[in-house]
Image: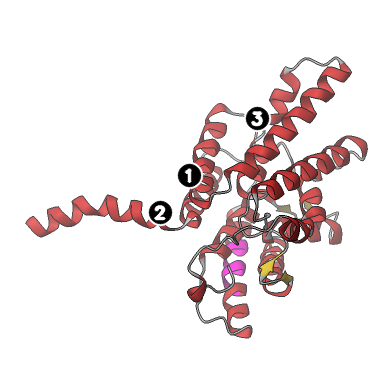
Amino acid sequence: MTTLAITTATLPNRIAALLRGDARHFQIVALASLLVFNLGWIDFGAKPLNSLLAILSALATQWLCTRIWRVPALDLRSPLITGLSLSLLLRADAPWVLAAAAAIAIASKFVLRIDGKHIWNPAGFAIVVLLLALPGHVWISPGQWGTSAWLVTLLAFAAFMVLNAARRGDVALFFLACQGALLVARALRLGDPLTIPLHQLQSGALLIFAFFMISDPRTTPDSRIGRFMFALAVALLAYWLAFSWQMRPALYMALIALSPLTVLLDRLFPAGRFAWRAPEHQGVA
């Protein structure tokens, strides 16, 4: 009885220690919670079969690439995050497209690398590739998440945990500040009420992009000044694509187009390289 009581009492502490040990644990919980909300209560467009195929394909591709590249340890946390992200953000008219997206995303981490660092956020890269390759079958809806207060609160709370653990909160805040300034400036120039840019900033899709994609610690510049310049560049390009070219997936296009800039920024402003784990145990994450 005493042993059971001690085990029960220490279980929350063990769970908390596990979550604090790697920011990806927070991210998995946050993204999985959003997917459960979608499937169980509020329909954001994600479908059970599509989501299952995206997740299984991401895990299977990670296993296969680990074998091909002879990575010593198989780590399924990052591919699980990629599969969940694609389930929440990507829409297609056939389930196999989600499986293909996950395979493209994970393979890009192994194939497209410079100095041991993959260049593009895997989910963002797959989304852009399929938007360009299958324009009539794949789409992203920037407003698909709505602006419900509970969703914004949930995203903000989840993002705080993730970014605090990953030490990349600055790039998300830099980006949102730049995006907000551009939208407010546009509203003032056009004479629109400020409720319009406020409404645009409350988009769940924008918050997911800021907190879970542009802030990816493995594909953002190592230095803080580099991350600020990167966030500003993405915000400016996305604004131009959205309002000059009327491009709906402007955020993703801007992020993928400018991600190679990270290599230059790392060389201009060198800083410590981010790693999920100790280097001697690190594989491809």
The part of the chain drawn in magenta is 53-60
Considering only order in the chain, which callout, 2 or 3, is on the residue closer to the N terminus?
2
Task: Determine which residue is flagged by label 2.
Answer: 19
Q: Which residue is mark 1?
A: 161
Label 1: few (<14), some (14–19) or many (≥20) C-alpha neighbours in 10 Å: some
Q: Is residue 262 left or right of residue 165?
A: right
Give whichever of 130, 65 is nearer the camera: 65
Element type where label 3 sits in the image:
loop
Other residues around mark 3 within 10 Å, as few (<14) / some (14–19) / many (≥20) = some
Residue type marked 3: Gln
Question: Which residue shows up at 69% across the image and 48% down it?
Answer: 227
Q: Which residue is mark 3?
A: 202
The mark tally for this picture is 3
Mark 1: secondary structure: helix
Label 2 – label 1 distance at C-alpha: 9 Å
Instruction: Look at 68% across and 55% down and name the residue there.
Output: 221
Q: In which quarter of the view is residue 58 placed?
A: bottom right
The reply to whether discs 2 and 1 touch (Cβ–Cβ < 8 Å) is yes
- Type of amino acid under label 2: Leu
Q: Of label 2 and label 1, which has the lower sequence position?
A: 2
